[in-house]
Image (cartoon, grey):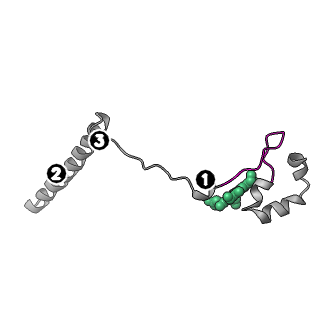
Amino acid sequence: MTSTGSRSWFYIAFFVGAVGAAAVGMVVLISTGVLEPTVAPIPQAPVVAQLELPAPRPQGYVGSDACLECHQDVAEAYATNPMRVQVLQ
Ligand code: HEC
């Protein structure tokens, strides 16, 4: 083995040791509460925040009217589908 080869093993061992020490350090800092991992709050979509729901039906369903504003094509297609009878009437 050449001297260059043994030196490269030293660099690899040093790199692996440094990364391992950094990982252990992060775990210690987070587990002791010194570092707090922060998660940014997810902002609510403005279109949902503005949504006004129609009065719920007696069974608790809002009905297709609630979907019409944004899903007009789906609501119109569903109006002629026999399955609508189960939920809407
Ligand atoms: C304020 C607008 C709005 C209203 C009112 C609304 N939706 Fe949606 N809906 C959306 C948007 C925008 C998407 C697409 C979201 C995405 O792809 O990330 C969506 C997606 C969907 C999907 C998924 C479609 C797919 O192909 O993945 C379904 C199912 C759905 N809506 C059903 C409904 C139903 C049922 C109602 C009524 C109770 C309703 N929506 C009311 C805006 C609305």
SS for dot 1: helix
Expressed as whole percent of the image width and height from the top left, the position of residue 78 reads 84, 59
The residue wearing badge 3 is 35
Amino acid on which disc 2 is placed:
Phe
Residue located at (23% from left, 46% from top): 22
| Residue 26 location, quadrant | top left
SS for dot 3: loop
Figure check: 33 above or below 65:
above
Q: Please state which of residues 63 and 30 is positioned toward the viewer in this rendering.
A: 63
Residue 79 - label: none
Magenta span main SS:
loop
Residue located at (26% from left, 41% from top): 24
Residue 14 - label: 2
Amino acid on which disc 3 is placed:
Leu
Label 2 or label 1, whichever comes before in sequence order: 2
Expressed as whole percent of the image width and height from the top left, the position of residue 79 reads 87, 59
Expressed as whole percent of the image width and height from the top left, the position of residue 35 reads 29, 41
Residue located at (19% from left, 55% from top): 12
